[in-house]
Amino acid sequence: MENRKLGKATDKRMALLRSQVTDLLWHGRIETTVDRAKEVQKIAEKLLTKAVNSYKDTVKNVETRQRKKKDKKGNVTVEEYKVELINDGPKKLAARRAIMSVIYERKETKGFSETKSAYRVRAGKINHPLVEKIFNEYAPKYDERATEKGTKGGYTRVLKNGFRRGDAAEMAIIELV
């Protein structure tokens, strides 16, 4: 089946779809035309399938590190401690990079009554909040749903919403199930 052209040049069409997929994954629901919603649905389903199939692939590493301490007399002691690091496995890393190549980068937004310091604590260590949201929230949720129902896919739903005033384009709401 061919892609819908949506009346735009390829580069503009792909930018539009990437933007709408990013908004869908960030907000969980967007309103657009039916044809755009069906194209966004294709892309979003593929990205979520990649995340669901690879989110469990992690590698644990235990490293021994040394720390030097000086006491009041100037004596130096070496203290060893262990650090447990959890990294992405090769399958998850490849999926993460593939997803990052499609979606646009989003920043965490500061809450209305949230202080700057509280915002920095909450969002300071997260480099790619949308990718983290996909792997930490959506992937486990949809994997559990797949084991319950015994089916994979069907992560999004398109609901027709009537016609837009002005140009009478058929509108739809696309949302994550």
Image (cartoon, helix red, strand yellow):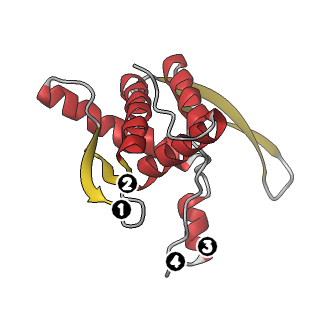
Q: Three-letter amino acid code at disc 2?
A: Ala
Labels 2 and 1 touching (C-beta < 8 A)? yes
Q: Earlier in the sequence, mark 2 or mark 1?
A: 1
Q: Which residue is mark 2?
A: 169
Q: Earlier in the sequence, mark 2 or mark 4?
A: 4
Q: Nearer the viewer, mark 2 or mark 4?
A: 2
Q: Residue furthest front?
A: 167
Q: Position of residue 173 (x, y in %)?
A: 31, 53
Taking the spot 21% from the left edge, 28% from the top edge, the residue there is: 146
Which of the two residues, 161 or 163, is positioned nearer the viewer here?
Answer: 163
Q: Position of residue 103 (x, y in %)?
A: 56, 40
Estimate the spatial distance between the alpha carbons at disc 1 and disc 4, rounded to whole Å: 37 Å
Q: How many marks?
A: 4
Which of the two residues, 167 or 159, is positioned nearer the viewer here?
Answer: 167
The C terminus - image quarter: top left
Crowding at mark 4 (Cα within 10 Å: few <14, some 14-19, many 20+)? few
Could you tell whether 98 is left or right of 43 in the image?
right
- Residue 13 showing in the rendered view: yes
Q: Nearer the viewer, mark 4 or mark 3?
A: 4
Above or below, 29 against 104 in this view is: below
Taking the spot 43% from the left edge, 47% from the top edge, the residue there is: 25
